[in-house]
Image: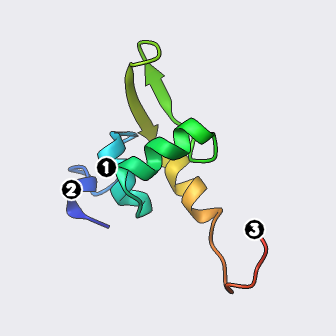
Amino acid sequence: MPDILLNNAGGLPPLLSPKLAAQLVGLSVKTLANMRCAGNGPQFIRYGGKRGRINYRSSDLITWRDSHLRSSTSEVI
């Protein structure tokens, strides 16, 4: 996990910007944005209406990331 994601206590901060969220789940910021529009990405928080600020809860990102864990490429999603 990139050091930039760790807070002073060694854990993840509760809210992450799209840039830090993308680093945590291993995707680009653009991919996360596309997933938000399509409704198939991790849950997010939007402040201030349609063009408001976006944040992700670190717990939601970890849950979403772990839900995509597979042991074979032939597994059906």
Where is mark 1, residue-wise? Answer: 20
Badge 1 vs badge 2, beta-carbon distance below 8 Å: yes
Residue drawn at point x = 36 percent, y = 49 percent: 29
In the figure, 65 relative to 56: above or below? below
Badge 1 crowding class, 10 Å Cα cut-off, few under 14, some 14 to 19, many 20 or more, is: some
Determine the CA span between mark 1 and mark 2.
8 Å
Locate the C terminus and report the quarter of the image it occupies: bottom right
Determine the CA span between mark 2 and mark 3.
31 Å
Choose between 70 and 12: the one closer to the eye.
70
At label 2, which amino acid type do we have? Answer: Ile
Residue drawn at point x = 56 percent, y = 46 percent: 42
Image position of 59 (left or right of 5): right
Image position of 3 (left or right of 21): left
Where is mark 2, residue-wise? Answer: 4
Query: Would residue 6 be visible to someone looking at this image?
Result: no
Image position of 29 (left or right of 62): left
